[in-house]
Image (cartoon, rainbow, N blue to C red):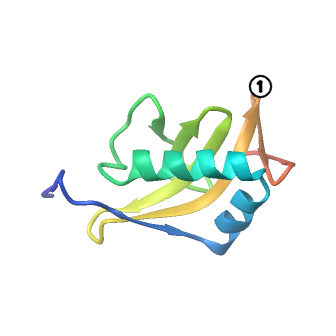
Amino acid sequence: MTRFADRMYTITFTASAREDIRWFRKYDQQRIVAAIESQLGQEPDRPTQQRKYLRPNQLARWELRAGPYRIFYDVIIDDMVVSILAVGYKDGNTLYVRGKEYTL
């Protein structure tokens, strides 16, 4: 596998993820999108303090933390695509997606 650190990944959103983002206030939407753009354009499959690989689950392989917000995504390395699958927020140990409790 060859990596090109200077090449940017294409970021796509599922229809469901777009609806998840619309659920938040405009200010929060901007914060979420800014985190996605700054954190996932290059090396989205590298764990950091904000990004972590998740245990096997039905939602996504990766999680990006942006304050209380959680962005769930998969990476297709060969195509250089990041697919945003869901967006929610955490309150304590509970994850909410569109205001409803969600279990990974």
| Above or below 55: residue 6 | below
Which element is circle 1 on? Answer: loop
Identify which residue is drawn at 42% across, 46% down: 38
Residue 88 appears left or right of 53: right
Q: Quadrant of the N terminus?
A: bottom left
Give percent across and percent down for residue 30: 62, 51
Identify which amino acid the numbered label 1 is placed on: Gly
Extreme residue toward the front, this view: 27
Identify which residue is drawn at 72% across, 41% down: 89
Identify which residue is drawn at 49% across, 51% down: 36
Of 17 and 36, the residue lying toward us: 36
Which quadrant of the structure image shows residue 4? bottom left
Q: Is residue 62 visible?
A: no
Give percent across and percent down for residue 41: 36, 54
- Residue picked out by circle 1: 92
Of 84 and 35, the residue lying toward us: 35
Extreme residue toward the right, this view: 100
Q: Is residue 23 visible?
A: yes
Give percent across and percent down for residue 97: 77, 51
Residue 51 appears left or right of 99: left
Which quadrant of the structure image shows residue 85? bottom right
Give percent across and percent down for residue 81: 37, 67
